């Protein structure tokens, strides 16, 4: 069996660079492999991707739509009904939610929405609450604590905008 350190490229697999337009003896002289005359024989030929012979190309004919804001916040959404799985009197925060599998992946903050029923007294700590979610939590005897949203540390923001006119 061949090992990685003993691998060799196949014999005659390296090809010479094609040198065009270097005289008749090279085999690629005179027209340099471009054939005779015509648009494709000229330099500055319109051969880029999407060129349609002068017709307005598809990427310009289609309407432009949508906008993705560069500083968009990604929210991990949790419904009040799914908090029912926690024991009464428990503190539900980001760590508890991820351990329970209710929030996954990368996100900037947690938002609690009011879908479902909550019967247990819980202390819920999240970055945002909908009005119905807050009401449902307080109705069951619990409390909803709103955490401040820290998207990135102020010092890293200052570093990112250093010398760009932003004051830290």
Image (spheres, grey):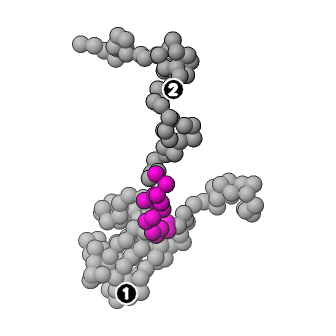
Query: Residue 96: image x %, image y %?
Result: 36, 64
**Outermost residue, left side:** 1
Q: Earlier in the sequence, mark 1 or mark 2?
A: 2
Q: Is residue 60 magenta?
A: yes
Residue 98 falls in which quadrant of the image?
A: bottom left
Residue 138 makes an appearance in the image: no
Residue 113 makes an appearance in the image: yes
Query: Residue 153: image x %, image y %?
Result: 60, 60
For the C terminus, the image quarter is: bottom right
Along the line of sight, which residue is nearer the eye, 130 or 46? 46
Horizontally, is 151 left or right of 57 in the view? right
Q: Which circle marks residue 102 in the picture?
A: none
Query: Residue 143: image x %, image y %?
Result: 41, 81
Horizontally, is 24 left or right of 120 in the view? right
13 to 112, vertically: above or below: above
Residue displayed at 27% across by 81% down: 116
For the N terminus, the image quarter is: top left
Query: Residue 2: image x %, image y %?
Result: 28, 13
104 to 28, vertically: above or below: below
Along the line of sight, which residue is nearer the eye, 113 or 25? 25
**Secondary element at image label 2:** loop
Is label 1 or label 2 in front? 2
**Secondary element at image label 1:** helix
Along the line of sight, which residue is nearer the eye, 7 or 19? 19
Q: Is residue 40 magenta?
A: no
**Outermost residue, front side:** 37
Residue displayed at 41% across by 16% down: 14
Q: Which residues are magenta?
A: 53-68
* 10 Å crowding of disc 1: few (<14), some (14-19), many (20+): some
Helix, strand or loop: magenta stretch: loop
Q: Which circle marks residue 31 in the picture?
A: 2
Alpha carbon distance from label 1 to label 2: 77 Å
């Amino acid at each position: 069996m061949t090992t990685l350190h003993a691998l060799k490229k196949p014999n005659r697999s390296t090809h010479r660079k094609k040198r065009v337009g270097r005289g008749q003896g090279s085999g690629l002289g005179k027209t340099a492999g471009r054939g005779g005359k015509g648009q494709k024989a000229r330099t500055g030929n319109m051969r880029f991707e999407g060129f349609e012979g002068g017709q307005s190309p598809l990427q310009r004919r289609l309407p432009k739509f949508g906008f993705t804001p560069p500083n968009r916040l990604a929210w991990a959404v949790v419904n009040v009904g799914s908090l029912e799985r926690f024991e009464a009197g428990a503190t539900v925060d980001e760590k508890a939610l991820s351990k329970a599998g209710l929030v996954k992946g990368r996100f900037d903050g947690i938002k609690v929405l009011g879908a479902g029923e909550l019967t247990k007294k819980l202390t819920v700590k999240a970055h945002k609450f909908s009005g119905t979610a807050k009401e449902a939590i307080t109705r069951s005897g619990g409390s909803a604590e709103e955490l401040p949203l820290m998207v990135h540390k102020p010092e890293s923001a200052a570093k990112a905008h250093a010398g760009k006119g932003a004051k830290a």
